[in-house]
Amino acid sequence: MAHAQTKHRSPESYRLPKDHPWSSAWKASAGVGVVGLLLSLVAWKIDGQRFAFAWLFAFITVLAVALGALFFVMMHHLTGASWSVAWRRVAELFARGLPVFLLLFLPIVLSIDELYPWAHHAKSRGRGDHHAWMREVGVTGRARADDHGDDNEKRGSLPSSAEEEHTPQHALHEATIEAKLAYLNPAFFGLRAILYLVLWAWLGWFFSSRSIEQDFKRGISLSKDLQKKSPLGTVLFGLTVTFAAFDWLMSLEPTWYSTIFGVQFFSVCVVAGLATIIVATYLLRKSGPLADVLTVEHYHDLGKLLFGFLVFWAYISFSQFMLIWYASIPEETTYYHHRWQGGWAAYSIGMAIGHFIFPFLFLLSRNIKRRIPLLAFGAGWLLAMHVVECFWLVMPYASNHLSIHWMDGVALLAVGGIYLSIVLFFVSRHPLVPAGDPRFERSLHHEVV
């Protein structure tokens, strides 16, 4: 009966009512973002280096959600599926917030010297002082050539003599960085970042704008156009996400490399994006226009997709670890040594259990995926573990020891609050389903076979 009632409803009927609590939620989120931003300025003044890592952690955490939503939208058009039409608008609105990351990236640009050792080296090369870079990097212990060695007491300490600066390990380390400076230099780094962020912003805006336009124009022509654009968009998305992972995360330790790291970060984005869509629609569905649109059948299918990408994430993450462990090449193993010392070992084990073993067993059951509150709990759990994982990706380079600082929470409030305020503003202004899509009616009657 619910589906029959929705057949002739106009797109406007799928908007949130003006007196609905979610209609003004963007103001509260903006307030949180502004407070977080003000506290971030204080944090920056207190300890610029520690804050730089906190901001990068928050930026990557929130950006991954938006990128995962964008991938879901393009995947929908790429496959021409009908079951996902009912989900698409919420994902589009999360992707529509991508332009704000152009502004949120500015603190990273301003903190490039604090975050990336190669930036020091590039400037030192320009001054003709190579060893100044080695001394600067040695203060924090980041990217040290002996980080994979057994002498833990030397980590984070300055060279005690000029001879130590000229050991074969340091010479090899410096030569490795020198060979990468054509790619790892501040100017080219900034240019690539602008390219990534502008492309993502355009893709998010293009797919969401055309979809919203279809609400009132209707017809199949816009659907065909979006389907034609999605293959190229997906290819560009895959390339830029991979290189962004190399630039913003892997180059935190410029002598380390992993050819699978870009795929691993892609899986991080997709799991976070799918989990966010489930949680957001669950909250909107409880009291809003989505109540008679998204059914148990829809949640069952999206739950299966989330479960599948969770397994994919685990497969890629374990493959990277296994290959590095088996080869035991010092330049590669240093990545996991950073995450197995100074308190990080317990954190790493806990993340493996919390991010895979528990959600895998929880989401494995068909009954769980067909019980919407339980599925929403599982998705919310994965979102929390997404924050834990992004902290694990960034923070081992901030200190040799595990340290959770108030700056981390402040940065997350700032980035998350600002981004969500943009998303929630669009949620309050646009229909929550693509009612003009020719496949919308079929999506309403979707059943899992």
Image (cartoon, rainbow, N blue to C red):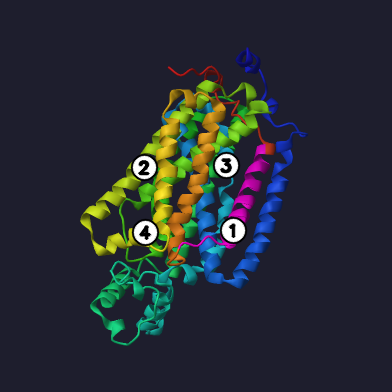
Q: Nearer the viewer, mark 3 or mark 2?
A: 2
Magenta stretch: dominant secondary structure: helix
Residue labelled with disc 3: 94
Q: Which image quadrant for residue 163?
A: bottom left
Q: Is residue 35 magenta?
A: no
Badge 2: residue crowd in 10 Å (few <14, some 14–19, many ≥20): many
Q: Over which residues does the magenta segment extend? A: 402-427
For label 1, count other residues whose C-alpha is less than 10 Å away and answer few (under 14), some (14-19) or many (20+): many
Q: Nearer the viewer, mark 1 or mark 4?
A: 4
3 or 1: tag closer to the N-terminus: 3
Along the line of sight, which residue is nearer the eye, 272 or 330? 330
To which residue does mark 1 refer? 411
Residue 274 in the image, given as x and y percentages of width and height: 49, 37
Q: Which residue is mark 2?
A: 314
Answer yes or no: is residue 69 visible. no
Is 82 situated left or right of 246 in this image?
right
Label 4 environment density (alpha carbons within 10 Å; few <14, some 14–19, many ≥20)? some
Q: Are marks 4 and 3 in contact (CB under 8 Å)?
A: no
Is residue 56 something one can see in this rendering? yes
The residue lying at 74 percent from left, 31 percent from top is: 17
Residue 340 badge:
4
Which quarter of the rendered picture does the N terminus lie within?
A: top right
